[in-house]
Image: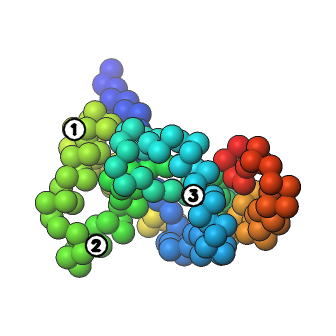
Amino acid sequence: MLRRKKKPELSITIDPIPSCNWYINLRKYLPIYIWKDIRKEVLEYFNYKCAVCGSTLKVECHEEWNISDRFRVQTLVGFILLCKRCHELKHWFRTVNEEKKGKISTKYYNSLIQHFLDVNEVDILVFHEHVEDSKRKVYIRKKYNYILSWGKFCPVKIEERWKKVQREKDPKQFLVVR
Ligand SMILES: [Zn+2]
């Protein structure tokens, strides 16, 4: 009997975020000084290293979302630290647009694909398949409106918690990670 080869587990994947919620992020809803504290906390928690490939070059905070297609709700579940290359792979469709507009060079664009292959230890076919799978998900999700939920990261509550931390000057009280 012919059996399809099992898809490999990928360390770095593309986030198929519903297009109605593209460009929305928590940072925009918080005062900059609170966002800076959250960023610092994420940096320290991940020891200034990319959570996927371990690189320490240009690390950035990435929001992780849980997407329910059944209920059409997109919920913020946490943050991870990613290096610039892993981050640009996560937001692949934005990266593709940037290459088209000439904002990033083709050489750099190709180096991102190579990074995907190296980190996941897969060949180029797996990359193309993963891009097609993600595209399909985004295409299906495009037809609907997904409600955005901040989950336990509601900006108003974070601001309250931040003020409490300031008042009590207790470094053990973390804002988001733990
Ligand atoms: Zn990385």
Residue 55 visible within the image: yes
Residue tagged 1: 123
Spot occupied by residue 165 in the image (x, y as percentages of width and height): 80, 57
Select label 1 or label 3 by which is in front: 3
The residue under label 3 is which amino acid type?
A: Arg
Kind of element beneath mark 2: helix
Tell me the tag on residue 98.
2
> Observer-nearest residue: 167 or 104?
167
Distance between mark 1 and mark 3 Cα atoms: 34 Å
Q: Which mark is residue 108?
A: none
Image quarter of the C terminus: top right
Q: At 80% from the left edge and 54% from the top edge, which residue is drawn?
A: 169
Residue wearing tag 3: 39
Q: Where is residue 171 in the image (x, y as percent from the top left)?
A: 74, 47
Residue at x 25% of width, y 53% of height: 112
Q: Earlier in the sequence, mark 2 or mark 1?
A: 2
The mark tally for this picture is 3
Q: Can residue 143 be seen from the camera position used here?
A: no
Front position in the image: 28 or 138: 28
Inspect the image, locate mark 1, and give the three-letter code of the amino acid beneath it.
Answer: Asp
| For residue 87, above or below residue 123 | below
Left or right, residue 70 beside residue 135: right
Q: Distance between the residues labelled 2 and 1?
A: 24 Å
Say what secondary structure mark 1 lies in.
Answer: loop
